[in-house]
Image (cartoon, rainbow, N blue to C red):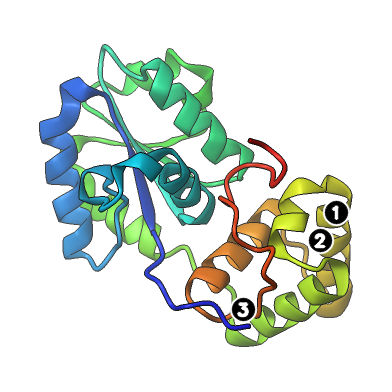
Amino acid sequence: MIATRQQTVDVFLSFSAAESALAGRVADQLRAHGLVVFDEDRLEERAHIEDAMWDAVAECRAVVAIVSRDAPTSRMTFEIGAALAWRKPVFAIASDWSLTRVNPLLAQASVYSPDRIDDVARAVRSIRDLSARDRRVLAGACRATAGSVDQLIADPVLLDSLEARYQARTGQFVPAERLLSELLRMRKQGLLKTSGRDRKAPGRPADEP
């Protein structure tokens, strides 16, 4: 069946409670550039916030982390670590560049000062989705590899097979995590045929509680 079309997340914003005010300004500025920013405060069902966060990290184009002297917090470290596991670009907003070198998770982040949010937005917008043709190839490779996207999430062997099959069909190497993230975006946008089994949160293995 074809999934219902839903809006996909472009940016996952990671920040500490102490930086909530700045985070709000950053989110507003990113949205002014047409980007969809995950905002847990806007969720209609607060009981599902953890799954929604997993979804957002899995499907987003990039993570923007606001770094201050009390950050990254343990929660931010978890969020950034998850983003790196998905091979997401990480952009750090910091008034003091040296703060990003305290935590090794931020060692490869692109660092911007708070007055350069427009540059961050342009950098995120430059991250392209796959072409329509490559998406069709990816959808076909997914169907040939597994019965559902969630099976790919749960089985690293199947995910490796998807990567190899996509490369064989296109001649392009795209990391398996990027392909899976693209499939999640396609599914949410209603562009991917899914089975009834494709209903679990995409950010974690399908057999987790």
Q: Is residue 115 left or right of residue 167?
A: left
Instruction: For mark 3, give the secondary structure.
Output: loop
Residue 87 sits above or below residue 161 on the image = above
- Give the percent coordinates (x, y) of residue 123: 37, 56
Q: What residue would you read off at disc 1?
A: 160
- Give the percent coordinates (x, y) of residue 180: 66, 59
Residue 125 visible, this angle: yes
The reply to whether callout 1 and callout 2 are in contact (CB within 8 Å) is yes
Identified by mark 3, the residue type is Leu
Q: What residue would you read off at disc 3?
A: 192
- Give the percent coordinates (x, y) of residue 162: 82, 63
Q: Pick whichever of labels 2 and 3 is earlier in the sequence.
A: 2
Residue sitting at x 51%, y 56%: 59
Q: Residues within 10 Å of mark 1 (few under 14, many from 20)?
A: some
Q: Is residue 66 left or right of residue 137?
A: left
Q: Pick whichever of labels 3 and 1 is earlier in the sequence.
A: 1
Instruction: For mark 2, give the secondary structure.
Output: helix
- Give the percent coordinates (x, y) of residue 11: 36, 52
Residue 26 sits above or below residue 136 on the image = above
Identified by mark 2, the residue type is Glu
Name which quarter of the figure residue 193 lies in.
bottom right
Residue sitting at x 77%, y 71%: 142
Residue 175 visible, this angle: no
Residue sitting at x 62%, y 78%: 192
Identified by mark 1, the residue type is Asp
Q: What residue would you read off at disc 2?
A: 163
Q: Nearer the viewer, mark 3 or mark 1?
A: 3
